[in-house]
Image (cartoon, grey):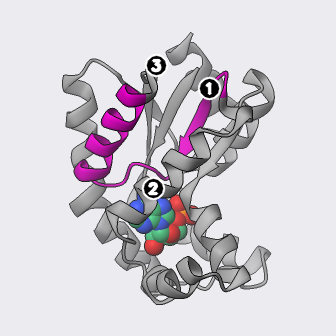
């Protein structure tokens, strides 16, 4: 199963991805997690990405497409993967199509987790409090920027994938368990 989870910051992509990982025994590929790991390790990529991630902007399409393509070649991705936070632009979605073509693979579905932006601000502020400020980009100002970036650059992927017949939408405002049930039934 090769799945994309699409949705604004705080919609629950990461939470749902973690649940689906254990159901389908396939890994979650989160570009956000990969970038945060690179930033923590101060790798050349991390040093380049830090300021961009901290202000809520997007890292370049080529960089994230490159790290995702390499990650997909790891043996644990042989039976599929859940993409969480990638693609985030039309250029990334096109790069994804090409990299999958080259590998002889295709996406099974793109699940859009729909969410109300006003509720997301509240959720992320709570996430920041619970994690004790573990993420520099989980604060109100940067979150508003990330929501703006989502609506400008990522939301167009909804019609992109809908036109390809791959899009399934679920209500991300429902309780976590209900969202999981809706995703599983959408992709089964
Ligand atoms: P996330 O954990 O998915 O919310 O990502 C956190 C931050 O990492 C984003 O706000 C971006 O700065 C960066 N990032 C993650 N995934 C991507 C991507 N696919 N393209 C560009 N930037 C990304």
Image quarter hosting the N terminus: top right
Query: Would you say the residues marked 1 and 3 are in contact, meaning their CB atoms lie under 8 Å apart?
Result: yes
Give above or below for 65 relative to 75. below
Image location of residue 48, percent across then percent down: 48, 85
Give the residue drawn at x 36%, y 67%. 147
The answer to whether residue 138 is above or below residue 20 is below
Q: Which residues are magenta?
A: 78-102
Task: Report the disc number at residue 80.
Answer: 1
Magenta segment: does it hold 141?
Answer: no
Circle 1 packing at 10 Å, graded few (<14), some (14-19), many (20+), is: many
Residue 5's spot in the image, x, y percent? Answer: 50, 39
Per the rendering, the mark at residue 66 is 2
Q: Are marks 1 and 2 in contact (CB under 8 Å)?
A: no
CB-based contact (under 8 Å), mark 3 and mark 2: no
**Residue behind label 3 places its C-beta within 8 angstroms of ligand 1:** no
Q: Is residue 142 left or right of residue 158?
A: right
Mark 2 C-beta closer than 8 Å to ligand 1 = no
Q: Is residue 60 left or right of residue 182?
A: left
Distance between mark 3 and mark 2 Cα atoms: 21 Å
Label 2 crowd bin: few (<14), some (14–19), many (20+), radius 10 Å: few
Circle 1 SS class: loop
Q: In front: 84, or 124? A: 84
Residue 163, position in %: x, y? Answer: 19, 24
């Amino acid at each position: 199963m090769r799945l994309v989870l699409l949705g604004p910051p705080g919609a629950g992509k990461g939470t749902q991805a973690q649940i689906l990982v254990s159901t389908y025994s396939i890994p979650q590929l989160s570009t956000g997690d990969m970038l945060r790991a690179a930033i923590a390790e101060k790798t050349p990529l991390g040093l380049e990405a830090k300021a961009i991630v901290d202000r809520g902007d997007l890292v370049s399409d080529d960089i994230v497409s490159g790290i995702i393509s390499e990650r997909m070649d790891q043996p644990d991705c042989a039976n599929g993967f859940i993409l969480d936070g990638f693609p985030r632009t039309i250029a990334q979605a096109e790069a994804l199509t090409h990299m999958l073509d080259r590998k002889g693979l295709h996406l099974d579905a793109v699940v859009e987790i729909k969410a109300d932006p006003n509720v997301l601000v509240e959720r992320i502020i709570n996430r920041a409090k619970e994690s004790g400020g573990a993420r520099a980009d989980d604060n109100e100002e940067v979150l508003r920027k990330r929501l703006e970036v989502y609506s400008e650059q990522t939301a167009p992927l909804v019609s992109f994938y809908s036109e390809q017949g791959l899009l399934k939408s679920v209500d991300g405002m429902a309780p976590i368990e209900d969202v999981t049930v809706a995703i599983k039934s959408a992709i089964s």
